[in-house]
Amino acid sequence: MQNNEPNSIHRFFLGGVGPLILLALWQVAYQATIFNPTLLPSPIQTIEALFALMQSSYFWESLRQTFYIFVIGYSAAIFVGSFIGIFFGSSKLFRFLAMPVFDFFRSTPVTVLYPIFVLFFGVGALSKTVMVFFSCMLIITVNAAYGVILSNPTRSQTLALFGANGFQVFYHVKLKEALPHIFVGARVALGIALIVVILVEMFMGSDRGLGQLVIEAFTAYETAKLYALIIITGFIGVLLNRLFLLLEKISIPWSYANAAGR
């Protein structure tokens, strides 16, 4: 049977078609002055601003500051959220008691809670890190809990019949079936973490950071630099997502094998 699915080289080239079309439309809009050139600089001006940013030490210091907050908050959220979620999924009583609270805060935008974080943790890096942690931890917790809840009871009963103890049943069935759900939650939280760290740097104020660079470019009306920062931030998001998908494929190969067999 012929496989019509494009290979990796074809996917690479096909993936570049969309950005090229977007650049072409952008250039046409600039040439036709559909928008004010001050508001929409040309792609060439934006690329020049992008290269100028790459040569700036302030940009790299800002990028490092953003990633510092992002990595600490996100990593802590994965660890704590997975642990709490597995415990929620394993304990029906605790789940009924605590899950409504988690659902409430998960449904509340973290930006609404911004004043509370400032009051308790100040306006420094700590409050930004805690906001990233809090927004991501809730998502991962709920996904981990449902991963345990939705684990196959037949497999657990079969292992128990063959003499497996509670820990063995948990490890070989519940944890392994919960991991794909945890990864889904962590992948969703990845984008949320990047959004939150950029937003809090923009509106909370900072001496450096990608969000601070964005707000400085906006305030100074440096639109080419502003668009360049948007492109850089989007590229970082895409790169992080690709790396996460690779990590997911390596960490839970059985999930991909099950999906391929459907």
Image (cartoon, helix red, strand yellow):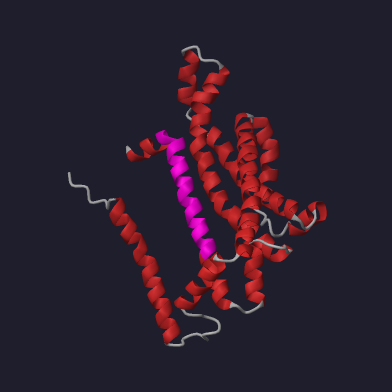
Residue extent of the magenta highlight: 232-254
Relative vertical location of residue 38 with respect to residue 126 in this rendering, above or below? below
Q: Is residue 20 left or right of residue 4?
A: right
Residue closest to the eye, 185 or 244: 244
Looking at this view, name the residue that lies furthest to the right: 119
Residue 136 seen in render = yes
**Residue 169 image point, x, y percent:** 52, 21
Magenta span includes 235 = yes
Q: Position of residue 95 (x, y in %)?
A: 65, 35
Residue 182 lies left or right of residue 13; in this view the side is right
Residue at x 43%, y 77% (from the top left corner): 26
Residue 89 included in the magenta stretch of the image? no
Relative side of 8 to 168, left or right: left
Front in this rendered view, residue 243 or 98: 243
The quarter of the displayed image where residue 84 is located: top right
The C terminus: image quadrant = top left
Q: Residue at x 51, y 52 (%)?
A: 240
In the rendered image, residue 228, in percent from the top left (x then y), is placed at 53, 70
The quadrant the N terminus occupies is top left
Q: Quadrant of residue 186?
A: top right
Task: Check the image and report above or below for 82 versus 39.
Answer: above
Query: In this rendering, does residue 262 appear at all?
Result: no
